Amino acid sequence: MKFKLIELNPLGHNRKVVLDKLPAVLGRSSSSQILVADQWVSRRHCELDEVDGVLVVRDLGSRHGTYVNGMRVSEARLLPDDKLTVGLTSFVASYRVGVRSARPADCLATDR
């Protein structure tokens, strides 16, 4: 399954990030799989993973929080067209929902 994040840029230069290997850490650190150059983003801000064909985001103890559709979350499903915001940077999730993982769904607790 192909998961993508599309960065929402007010200048219209929307970067597309293909998530080839999950889990993937999003942050300011050069060791992050998804590098975000935003001073309000922690070095290791959040982690993206796949559970039962759905993208899941987990905050990694970031200072300014991780938001899905405007709600602060510690862990949440990131469904297609959901908006992920870290710092001043926002992304839209783009993928088709499907069942791929053998991991149990009960490992998913959301704040929504």
Image (spheres, rainbow, N blue to C red):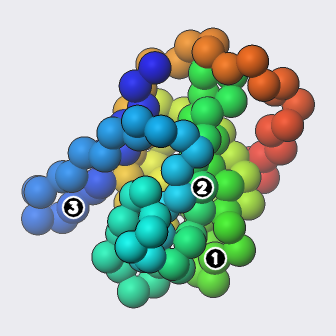
Q: Residues within 10 Å of mark 1 (few under 14, many from 20)?
A: some
Quick one: 53 or 72, which is closer to the camera?
53
Q: At which x and y percent is residue 82?
A: 48, 41
Q: Residues within 10 Å of mark 2 (few under 14, many from 20)?
A: many
Task: Residue 78: tell me if it is visible.
Answer: no
Residue bearing mark 2: 47
Quick one: 47 or 70, which is closer to the camera?
47
Q: Secondary structure at mark 2?
A: strand
Which tag is nearer the camera, tag 2 or tag 3? 2
Q: At which x and y percent is residue 34?
A: 40, 58
Residue bearing mark 3: 9
Q: Amino acid at mark 2?
A: Glu
Alpha carbon separation for disc pair 2 and 1: 11 Å
Q: Amino acid at mark 1?
A: Ser
Q: Earlier in the sequence, mark 1 or mark 3?
A: 3
Marker disc for residue 62: 1
Residue at 11% over, 57% down: 12
When the figure is inspected, residue 72 is found, relative to residue 76, above or below; the finding is below
When the figure is inspected, residue 2 is found, relative to residue 25, above or below; the finding is above
Q: Amino acid at mark 3?
A: Asn
Is 51 left, or right, of 82 in this rendering?
right
Quick one: 42 or 91, which is closer to the camera?
42
